[in-house]
């Protein structure tokens, strides 16, 4: 889809220097943060020399790392975690040079599913091993099942309720994935087991983490250390529905973090507004979206809730390319306040989640959502938008 | 697109009788409402006999009629107003039997534009005459201009700032459209000059109309006459942003009217929630959407407002089939409260209006909209959704 990986680089160091006068140093590692003397130990990657760089203010934006389970052979050739442009380039090179036939993807989250789909498109035989009963754990299992089906439909061999136990390594190279139920031949393994905040450096320096394991910040994105800020996948965010900090590794969130932290570091005033847990993805021809709390999160929060699932169409039923859309809604019992929503469907389905994300920000009840003046024309929607139908049906249970 | 017009009939009289036990009489005209004796004069269409039918409660749902300007020849053969399934069938038959080559569409609203597009697709030469500087008067002219361009691009001869003066009729059949600036040869004329509430019957009976010319109703959809209700294109709706009644002839509104009136007539309790003026349409490859107030409506309301127009992309810039999207936003000066929004763009653009419709219901400011936790993935959106970008840029002017 993209011919040249350079197209994916939003800004080069040179462009940033030219546009903003900011000196960007790539290929430099920070090996230590010294909070007392307010300095960083820097090491250039191709140079043994290290030095201390002083700072007045510090922004920690160390991102996240793919989870690598502590099993033997995890570092063998042919096993990839894909979370950076560089790791994608390496994987691409490996496929070109080694022409693997059988791929095993471990984990059915966003990355695992996108990798499974694209490896199928490149002609590999793909198996996917998922520990949970259904893929896409950010959805409830009854909605995740629709995504599992889409994967099977494109030819992925899906193994659910099954856990990674180890690898068979032959001459430093992976040859089999060993699960608690079988052995799967593998020329290539993708780790799609999620990411964890990359906080090693911050933790070593004594910058406090929150309960989520990400760096604790206030609503200005300042850590518990004066004039030390954090943002992106390594930092927590306030979740407006659970009313608790959350660690959500998404670009939208990271961008907002950066804007808020940067404004405040520059002497301005900005507040991170909080998030509601919105995310979308596309798996094969299926669009997937969620916002707010899923059932297990609502339970953790101690909320009494009702839920409903409806099936409708993405466009007017008689309109060409109208396809199915399934909408699930969770509402607080009694008040009817929306707690969360999930959508799985064909083209045009997913972006509707933004209506419900906005409704969550507004604190709307399902009764209010059912009454919204939403748009209708046959190319876009049935007369009652599926989200309004879902709200009306959920209302009956409130 | 639809092979058989029967597919477009949502429910037949038989189906309604069977499902709901409601006796539906089609091909019966009501010629008089007698409010004193609470009865209707009924005439069967193929029968000279009339009779009085008593009622306890009455629902007036007489819809709207296409505006037919009082010019000579307006009733000649070849001139069509298209507002019912029956009128569409008649037009279709006329085209099949007469094979017109040159069509002139009068008026560049939803119906006029959709007709122009589809007549072009059927191979006719199409001219469109619009009185205003740009088509699609429900948008501000700077946004309407984008729709005008789309029309010209598909081959419509567009005449703006030009008014209908009359017709040349040859042997009872239209042969030319006469405007204030030229004569346009025409084998077929489509009237797309909008609709007006069909209130003749109600007015004759003494059911009061509102300032909009539609039947005045309260929020239960009851008219000023006890136990006489009205809904659909013939009735007013409360507009939540202008805080005044409005006459909006859209299916979404009519459906909500019907649900509210029916619930109340049946002894239940329902309230029409009010509308914010949301509408979408598709003209050629261009998606068009609006909600809230356009500039002239904001002026009529006496609001001090700022506006901004931004151009972004429907998907991530590097993603296949990413196309342009233009978003215009109006916000109250000082408070920053959203007053209205308009969107013109390629596939995926229009349905975003629902985010802003929801924001209008919530009374959100552009600052709040800029901070919404909206969804992002490359197939759906650039990282900052165009509506969030528009909100942020509008905020700078507030």
Image (cartoon, coloured by chain):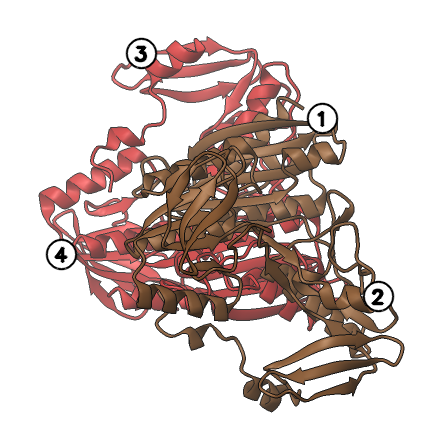
Chain colours: A brown, B red
The residues tagged by marks 3 and 2 sit, at their Cα atoms, a distance apart of 94 Å
Mark 3 or 4 closer to N-term?
A: 3
Q: Which residue is mark 4?
A: B101
Q: Measuring 39% from the left and 36% from the top, which residue is drawn there?
A: A149
The x, y position of residue B267, in whole percent, is 63, 14
Q: Which residue is mark 1?
A: A333
Residue contact between numbered discs 1 and 3, judged by CB atoms under 8 Å: no
Q: Nearer the viewer, mark 3 or mark 4?
A: 4
Q: Nearer the viewer, mark 2 or mark 1?
A: 2
Q: Measuring 56% from the left and 54% from the top, which residue is drawn there?
A: B375
Q: Are marks 3 and 2 on the same chain?
A: no
The residues tagged by marks 3 and 4 sit, at their Cα atoms, a distance apart of 43 Å
Specify whether B126 is left or right of B220.
left
Q: Can residue A301 be spotted in the picture? A: yes
Q: Quadrant of the C terminus of chain B?
A: bottom right
Name the chain letter of the residue that bears numbered label 3.
B
Name the chain letter of the residue that bears numbered label 2.
A
Question: Within 10 angstroms of label 3, few (less than 14), some, or many (20 or more) residues?
Answer: few
Q: Are marks 3 and 4 on the same chain?
A: yes
Q: Quadrant of residue B11?
A: top left
Q: Which residue is mark 3?
A: B49
């Amino acid at each position: 889809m993209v011919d040249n990986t350079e197209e994916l680089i939003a800004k080069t160091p040179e462009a940033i220097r030219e546009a903003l006068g900011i000196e960007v140093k790539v290929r430099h590692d920070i090996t230590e943060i010294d909070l007392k003397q307010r300095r960083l130990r820097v090491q250039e990657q191709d140079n043994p020399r290290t030095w201390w760089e002083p700072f007045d203010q510090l922004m920690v934006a160390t991102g996240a790392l793919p989870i690598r389970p502590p099993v033997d052979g995890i570092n063998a050739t042919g096993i990839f975690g894909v979370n950076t442009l560089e790791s994608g380039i390496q994987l691409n090179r490996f496929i070109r040079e080694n022409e693997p036939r059988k791929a095993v993807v471990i984990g059915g989250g966003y990355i695992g599913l996108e990798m499974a789909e694209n490896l199928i498109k490149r002609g590999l035989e793909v198996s996917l091993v998922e520990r949970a009963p259904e893929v896409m754990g950010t959805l409830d299992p009854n909605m995740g099942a629709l995504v599992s089906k889409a994967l099977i439909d494109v030819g992925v061999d899906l193994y659910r309720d099954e856990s990674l136990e180890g690898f068979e390594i032959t001459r430093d190279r992976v040859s089999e994935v060993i699960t608690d139920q079988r052995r799967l031949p593998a020329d290539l393994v993708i780790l799609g087991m999620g990411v964890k905040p990359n906080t090693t450096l911050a933790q070593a320096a004594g910058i406090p983490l929150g309960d989520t394991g990400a760096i604790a910040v206030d609503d200005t994105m300042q850590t518990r250390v004066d004039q030390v800020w954090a943002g992106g996948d390594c930092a927590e965010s306030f979740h407006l529905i659970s009313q608790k900090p959350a660690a959500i590794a998404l670009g939208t969130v990271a961008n907002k973090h950066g804007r808020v932290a940067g404004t405040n570091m520059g002497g301005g005033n900005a507040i991170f507004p909080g998030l509601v847990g919105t995310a979308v993805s596309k798996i094969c021809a299926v669009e997937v979206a969620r916002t707010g709390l899923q059932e297990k999160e609502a339970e953790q929060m101690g909320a009494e809730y009702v839920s409903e699932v409806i099936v409708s169409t993405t466009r007017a039923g008689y309109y060409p390319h109208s396809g199915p859309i399934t909408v699930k809604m969770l509402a607080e019992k009694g008040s009817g306040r929306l707690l969360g929503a999930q959508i799985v469907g064909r083209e045009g389905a997913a972006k509707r989640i933004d209506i419900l994300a906005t409704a969550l920000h507004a604190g709307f009840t399902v009764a209010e959502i059912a009454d919204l003046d939403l748009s209708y024309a046959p190319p876009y929607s049935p007369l009652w938008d599926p989200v309004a139908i879902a709200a009306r049906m959920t209302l009956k249970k409130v």
